[in-house]
Amino acid sequence: MSKKEVKLKFNAAWDLAPAPEDSKHVSIKKQYDLFINGEFVKPNSKKYFATYNPATDEKISEVADADEKDVDKAVKAARAAFGKWSKLSGKERGKYIYRIARLIQERAREFAVIETMDGGKPIRESRDIDVPLAANHFFYYAGWADKLEYAFPNRNPKPLGVAGQIIPWNFPLLMAAWKIAPALAAGNTVVLKPAETTPLTALKLAELIRDSGLPKGVVNIITGAGKTGAAIVNHPDINKIAFTGSTNVGKWIQKSIAGTDKKCTLELGGKAANIIFEDAPLDQAVEGIINGIFFNQGHVCCAGSRLFVQESVADIVIRKLKDRMETLKVGDPMDKNTDIGAINSKQQLLKIQEYIEIGKNEGGEIYQSSCSLPKKGNFCKPTIFLNVSQSHRIVQEEIFGPVLAIQTFRTIEEVIEKANNIPYGLSAGVWTDKGSKIFNLTSKLKAGVVWANTYNKFDPTSPFGGYKESGFGREGGLHGLGAYLQF
Amino acid sequence: MSRIEIQKTYKIYIGGQFPRTESGRYYPLKNKKGNVIANICLCSRKDFRNAEVAARGAQSGWGSKAAFNRAQILYRIAEMLEGRKEQFISELVLQGSTLAAAKQEVEVSIDRMVYYSGWCDKFQAIYSSVNPVASSHFNFSVPEPTGVVALIADENTSLLGLVTAIAPVIAGGNACVVLASESKPLCAVTFAEVLNSSDLPGGVVNILTGTSAELHEHFSNHMDVNAVIYYRNNKAEIKTIKENASLNVKRVFVYNKINIMSEKAESPYFIFDTQEIKTTWHPIENIGTSKAGY
Amino acid sequence: MSTKTTIPDFRVTPSIDQVGIEERVARFTTRSIKKESKMQGMKMVLSMIDLTTLEGKDTEGKVQQMCYKAAHLHDVIPGLPTVAAVCVYPSMVKTAKEALKGTGVKVASVSTAFPSGQSTHEIKIADTKFAVDNGADEIDMVISRGEFLKGNYNFVFDEIASIKEACGKARLKVIFETGELSTLDNIRKVSDIAMYAGADFIKTSTGKISPAATMPVTLVMLEAIRDYYYATGRMVGMKPAGGISTSKLALQYLIMVNETLGADWLSNEWFRFGASSLANDVLMQIAKQNTGVYQSSDYFSKD
């Protein structure tokens, strides 16, 4: 046999032609107002701000900038609606929520297209993951509305009142569903603020909720940036704050409401360990690494951003990982074949690039896939760093992008210690073929969600939320209801 | 001939030891007549730090003990309380209780400890769930101890406040540092003696005496404390605790509206408050004709 | 082989997680293949087909008709490739060889007491030699599944090695009959055994047992081929057989090959489809692509 290089060649013989999702059936207005008390109203300031498609940098629409007066108006509407809504029988409340679930399913494609246009995530994900999960979340919690006393025996659960909900830009519609569905099922009314870079699906949801016949004021959706969020947090007539976002903002919220009786749940940052043992199903583990860090461009609080590979299989795993990275298609999020779409905003791209520079300067060995990036828009190559340690900043800090820090380990004790050696505690991954080892690891990892031989799986029935600085409270499942009830 | 009575020295309880406060400070506890009954340790920030270290060191061992074993140890605590019943009653009387009230407080305390002993290996079944996810995965959620809990106990009871604060926290596998009642601290050290002779590993419960005014700040800003529970009514202290908690996203609970003598002050939900819910996913292989169903 | 290859311990082959494999497969099936890439893919599919007839009622006449189809898939459309090979019983090899003279289409013969493999070593060797002597370019042997499931891995290994020897210059495809092996772990294990024993191709199924080829099974085998390639530097081909009858599914298989093994395997030297009715479905899709209208099977010859 002649000597030749043993290397696989990807993307060499058969390129897939562009397969863009059709967006013609989607209607986006030039301008969106605030959804308060069942109707769209102009903002007090008369100010609007633009929302862009991060894949093209083109302006898609503009949305209202809510100030304190608008927040107050929304809270008043929610308060006024609370009495009737909370006294409605659980059965009737549930039927409204079911209706929302069904309407999302009917308009799923439209939601998926807008989610991808506004946020940059690949249409494959918004179509197959975000939108169906959002609908399922409403469907799941609808069924709880008339069963609350079974969830909390001996406690006589009662709704809290008005919930102020602030959600991030990484899963705009899904996070809205995670917040609104359990709040309504428990009998609360809601003022929700989507992130300023991704407001459109929430506003589409507002249209859908208006069409659903939900009583006016039960759900109010207002847009704006940090100032609007602060006004919600500090509004005296709000009973509960639910926040998903950065740990820094979460801490600020916790501090801001310290002098009040507001209830609070926080779903904050993470820096999850994804641990590969030598006896793992390695090809599936590599797939888990890919899903762990490159799902949604790595804009995932539970991303498996710290990879730990047992030293005996490190070379094989990294070779497989590099091969797999070569097959990832990076580019137009609307293309059905795109695996990694656009980074959500210029600002976030700059932050990621800064971390990549930090990683290089720290002496990490960088590897990026050979893909080419589109000339326009915000894109980042899938990136891994080898030869890093716990002391590297790119290992300690949440990057929120497609950047993976890889460390090797030798023993179980060592990897448990390193996995837990972080202020976060949202999620973790474990890959091994040995059942007893899995249970040992899952019980010792300080993390709210442990994926064993899988990663980044979500389901409405499954509680999600963190330990330590990743926040408190759970969303999803029976445990997610408790956050919206008083006893 | 009357004999000179040996007076008791009231110390604090850290890591299974009975040190004096490292600060060397004390405050005098007086009875109604204004006579000094005892000199009580006025604990400092450093005492709290030492106690926290002891608690952190003990927590993982305690949390991973068999739940049944934890139940037996809590029951043992109740047994030891029962054995020292008279001593607690006389200490309560010394601190101003009527005999009847003292007797009642001790009995409720003992019964409450037995109550939580029973929960040690049962609350998991109440708060766990197998979640029927749509994909081919087995998915379950279980409660796990949150870690180290700082407790500022009820001011108005000497023994019951301690038991009420500590029992649900340790039943759930946490370790704790607890600040005893400032005005009624006598039972604290006697209770520590009970703990020390009841197979509870040192460091799982650490008891300090002193003032909440001084210590609430440190209880709530320590970066290695996972939760703070406050049983008193000082609004300013509550606010500070909640603000400080945000430094490392501590869980904060304020229980100042419950009648501590009533059964409302005991429930598995108090255990649940210092638990974290952990959800685990694992694939289910499907070979054969029908899918495995969970 | 120029370098000495260490034969691994087959009792400890890598584990496979079935759910993970299925999730990976689901990703392949969501790829959207359009326009020129679809046309290119469909022509590749045609060129990779082992047009197959393996029936008790086969006759020389039937084989001759199929051979003509193999070399003339649909002459109305210019520029179409021929299939890669025809696959027949040993007794039909001579007929096929003559019918395909000058077409470039290869003749593959099943052997080793196909499909059950329940015969003696001598008969299996003789069966193979007969096919090779009659001109077979490729031999599709079956393994002894009973011995494999008993854990008699050395038996399986030695049998493959001896058939390989009997093949001479003919390329050896080793059929696992994956539908009888139950788990993906077994499929990974038998893939490793066959490759280390000298298989030029590994093949899923005889077509006589259901399930025949599936994408998860094929993915496990492709990953085994990849790992073997990295370990030894030797390329091994892959042939899913049975159950692949639509153009859409065949293209999804090619996506899987492309993203698991890459460009080098996207030729009929290293990838085949064992199929009897796939060709016409692909032809209908090509005609649809050319004319813009959906097709009827009445316009495509069945041989």
Image (cartoon, rainbow, N blue to C red):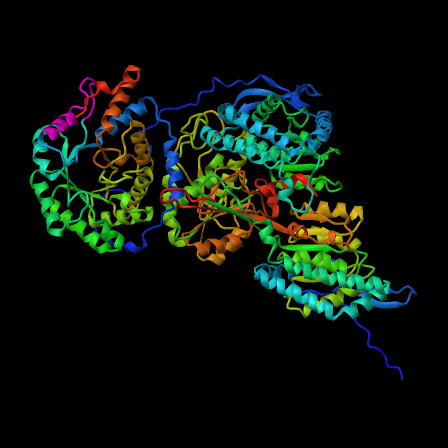
Q: Is residue B96 above or below residue C167?
A: below
Q: How many marks?
A: 0
Check if residue C77 falls in the magenta segment. yes
Q: Residue at (8%, 43%) from the top-left corner?
A: C130
Quadrant where the N terminus of chain B lies? Answer: bottom right
User: Observer-nearest residue: C203 or A370?
Assistant: C203
Question: Quick check: C5 left or right of B126?
Answer: left
Q: Residue at (80%, 53%) from the top-left corner?
A: B213
Look at the image and tell me whether residue A195 can be seen. Answer: no
Q: Quadrant of residue A283?
A: top left
Q: Residue furthest right?
A: B33
Q: Position of residue A273 (x, y in %)?
A: 50, 48
Q: Position of residue A168 (x, y in %)?
A: 59, 33
Q: Is residue A158 above or below residue B48?
A: above
Q: Which residues are magenta?
A: C61-81
Question: Quick check: C197 left or right of B227?
Answer: left
Q: Is residue B76 above or below residue A355?
A: below
Check if residue C106 falls in the magenta segment. no
Q: Residue furthest bottom?
A: B1
Q: Is residue B208 above or below residue A127?
A: below
Q: Position of residue A112 (x, y in %)?
A: 50, 26
Q: Quadrant of residue A45?
A: top right
Question: Quick check: C143 left or right of A216?
Answer: left
Question: Quick check: C12 left or right of A366?
Answer: left
